[in-house]
Image: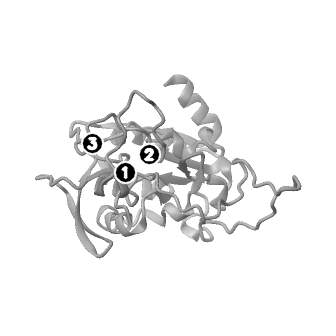
Amino acid sequence: MDSGSIITQVSKEEVNTPLQEKGAQNTSPSKKPRNRSIFQSLFCCLCHDNSEPIPVNNNAPLLVEENGSVTKATVKCLLPEIKPQDANKICVVIDLDETLVHSSFKPVNNADFIIPVEIDGVMHQVYVLKRPHVDEFLRRMGELFECVLFTASLAKYADPVADLLDKWGAFRTRLFRESCVFHRGNYVKDLSRLGRDLTRIIIVDNSPASYVFHPDNAVPVASWFDNMADTELLDLLPFFERLSKVDDVYTVLKQHRTSS
């Protein structure tokens, strides 16, 4: 396996080119191509197995047969039945890389976690930095919402990161790359497949490509790499406190986008 396909984005220190959105292919002629190395396969989600079926979903383009008929497929909900303690809570889908943490192969003296990842029989160390205020953010979000970790990274990397990151059990469910839809060069998180009412789902993500099917459900966040003065997660908490009390997220999110 080319190691760059495990994690969703290349470290800015490891490629001397501007970062592109997670999961998006770089088609700009003015940018240098990414280094096809161990960093490529672990940090970006460009590698796609063409044998992997693209699920039918409510907002993405439907699969069409040769005779012009739409493929009918029963798509299993990605989330289990809601737990009694979360019955009246809004579902919040939260991204991992560059939203809550930043990971790198390059050794970092102040790494919060060091995750061993096996690639083709060789163990590699991934150095993980936590975004400032992520602990407070996850603790409070877990109290207010039914939280779901949804990442385009592979579970062999993201699952152990989540084990160390989520000390409060905020994430009721974890979803990884196999739960994404590969659409036009991107791994997209199709919220219609979760099994929850879309009027009560929010996605928190730094990459618009990740929620292209449901932009009206998104609370965008800036990509984070190593700025330890960052306060975005902390600043968002009052907004989420307000959102946790509404019946329909669309009205509040529309107002939020208009005022931003």
First in sequence: mark 2 vs mark 3: 3
Q: Position of residue 8 (x, y in %)?
A: 40, 52
Q: CA distance from mark 1 to mark 3?
A: 17 Å
Q: Quick one: 132 or 65, which is closer to the camera?
A: 65
Examine the rendering and report whether any part of residue 244 can be seen.
no
Element type at mark 2: loop
Q: Find numbered disc 1 in the image and state the secondary structure of the residue it sits on.
A: loop
Q: Residues within 10 Å of mark 1 (few under 14, many from 20)?
A: many
- Residue that sits furthest to the top in the current view: 259
Residue 41 at what x, y percent from top left? 37, 57
Query: Where is 89 relative to 168, above or below?
Result: above
- Per the image, the residue denoted by label 2 is 22
Q: Dot 3, how many residues are within 10 Å of its Cα: few (below 14), some (14-19), or many (20+)?
A: some
The x and y percentages for residue 27 are 48, 35
Q: Could you tell me residue 21's position as x and y percent?
A: 44, 40
**Mark on residue 15?**
3
In contact (CB < 8 Å): disc 2 and disc 1: yes
Circle 1 residue: 97
- Identify residue type, mark 3: Val
Which residue corresponds to the image point at 62% horizontal and 53% vertical from the top-left? 191
